[in-house]
């Protein structure tokens, strides 16, 4: 009964720690989203682009002209002229310009999301690597303590005349190797936290959780792929490029319509004045030549880019999903094996009873440790590939 209660408590504790890890990782990503300088710069840039796309939608500036002409000979008198005019495109041009501006503005949102997702994915993968390193550090700490205890025992036995110097030397060399791994891992943890701080806009931040966040439900590939694709900002950017190219062609065609100029004209000559309407028309014979053809070429290029992206992206997601499937199989095998195996206590007991030699002990211990490290590496890669599969949700 007590054993059952203990298992329930351990299970509840594991859930609580896992929930904390999820919360802490979400907290880190929220902080990066708020403080990252690249995200801030991109936000400012695309806000500026939105304003840029709204320029040129209004009428051009009006024109005012004044002429003061002195006649020769003097008896010819003085002539004055004053003209104020406003030019404007054919009305359909302004409709097309507004439509183009809306599509360009819509594209900026997808470009911002794409940049944001890349940075958040980098931050999440850094956190996942830190979980791996933190778990590895716990294992290295245990190995270091265990080897230090063995070395102390070997030295005590040697002093009592019950041991040999070879066992002491083996343990010392093993401890040196473990300490090197220990320090290398501390350095790696430090570098990852520095990277996290950089992603956080230079504001110090660290991630110390040794537990991966709860895994999301992974649907079948046939369900995941279209969901990923439909939410992919890079696809939406290319789709917008296609729409923008279409709108630019429509605008180019409308620019072949004549421009109109209207205004007021005053003329004074020999004491007489003349007032009236000023009108003009610009006939687009040469200025817009080849713009429609250029636009059609740009549209074809945009369509080909979109098709190429859809093809490449499908296979990228397929590769990720296949990698996830294979890692899942390997990880489950490791989890099954290590749920029942813990060779170090057994090796300690066998060594104490003299059933194995010191060299056999360290060989068996290293074999077990290498397998466990491969398990930790597989676990990290598994979580990273899932983060990449769900990048579109960041």
Image (cartoon, rainbow, N blue to C red):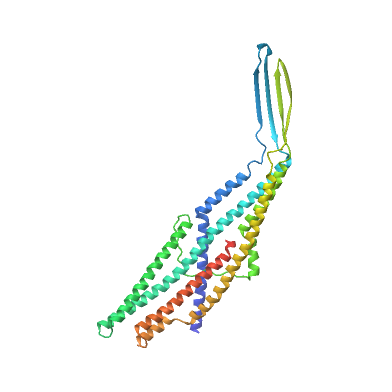
Q: Is residue 348 left or right of residue 261?
A: left
In the picture, residue 345 is in which quadrant?
Answer: bottom left
Task: Count the labels in the image.
Answer: 0
Q: Nearer the viewer, residue 378 or 350?
A: 378
Judged left or right of residue 227, residue 173 is left
Residue 8 visible, this orientation: no
Residue closer to the observer: 214 or 60: 60
Residue at 72%, 44% (x, y): give it.
253
In the rendered image, which quarter contains the C terminus? bottom right
Q: Is residue 209 above or below residue 6?
A: above
Q: From the top left corner, tell me how far across and down residue 195 is, in percent.
A: 45, 59
Taking depth in this image into account, of 258 and 157 the one nearest to the observer is: 258
Q: Residue at x 40, y 80 (%)?
A: 365
Looking at the image, is 33 positioned above or below residue 213? Answer: above
Tell me what residue is drawn at x 67 percent, y 48 percent. 295
Percent x, y for residue 136?
43, 71
The reply to whether residue 139 is visible in this rendering is yes
Q: Residue 199: horizontal and vertical position, in percent?
A: 48, 57
In the image, 148 versus 312, the foreground residue is 312
Q: Position of residue 4 (x, y in %)?
A: 51, 82
Q: Residue 358 falls in which quadrant of the image?
A: bottom left
Picture layout, residue 297 above or below residue 15: above
């Amino acid at each position: 009964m007590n054993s059952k209660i203990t298992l329930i408590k351990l299970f509840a504790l594991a859930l609580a720690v896992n929930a904390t890890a999820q919360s802490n990782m979400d907290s880190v990503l929220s902080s990066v989203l708020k403080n990252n300088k690249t995200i801030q710069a991109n936000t400012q840039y695309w806000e500026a682009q939105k304003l840029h796309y709204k320029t040129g939608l209004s009428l051009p500036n009006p024109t005012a002209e004044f002429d003061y002409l002195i006649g020769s000979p003097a008896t010819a008198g003085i002539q004055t002229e004053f003209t104020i005019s406003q030019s404007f495109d054919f009305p359909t041009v302004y409709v097309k310009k507004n439509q183009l501006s809306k599509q360009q503005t819509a594209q900026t949102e997808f470009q911002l999301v794409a940049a944001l997702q890349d940075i958040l994915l980098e931050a999440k993968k850094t956190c996942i690597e830190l979980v791996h390193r933190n778990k590895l550090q716990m294992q290295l700490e245990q190995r270091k303590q265990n080897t230090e205890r063995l070395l102390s025992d070997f030295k005590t036995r040697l002093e009592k005349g019950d041991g040999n110097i070879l066992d002491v030397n083996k343990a010392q060399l093993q401890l040196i190797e473990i300490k090197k791994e220990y320090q290398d891992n501390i350095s790696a943890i430090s570098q990852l936290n520095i990277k996290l701080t950089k992603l956080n806009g230079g504001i110090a931040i660290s991630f110390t959780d040794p537990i991966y966040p709860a895994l999301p439900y992974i649907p079948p590939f046939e369900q995941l792929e279209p969901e990923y694709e439909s939410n992919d900002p890079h696809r939406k950017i290319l789709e917008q490029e296609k729409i923008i190219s279409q709108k630019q062609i429509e605008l180019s065609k409308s620019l072949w319509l004549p421009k109109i100029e209207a205004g007021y004209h005053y003329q004074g000559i020999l004491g007489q004045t003349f007032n009236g309407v000023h009108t003009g028309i610009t006939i687009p014979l040469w200025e817009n030549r080849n713009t429609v053809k250029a636009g059609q070429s740009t549209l074809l290029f945009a369509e080909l880019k979109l098709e190429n992206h859809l093809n490449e992206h499908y296979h990228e997601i397929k590769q990720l999903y296949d990698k996830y499937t294979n890692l899942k199989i390997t990880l489950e095998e490791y989890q099954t094996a290590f749920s029942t195996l813990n060779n170090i206590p057994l090796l300690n007991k066998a060594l104490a009873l003299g059933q194995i030699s010191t060299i056999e002990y360290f060989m068996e211990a290293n074999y077990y440790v290498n397998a466990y490290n491969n398990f930790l590496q597989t676990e990290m890669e598994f979580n990273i590939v899932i983060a990449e599969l769900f990048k579109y949700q960041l």
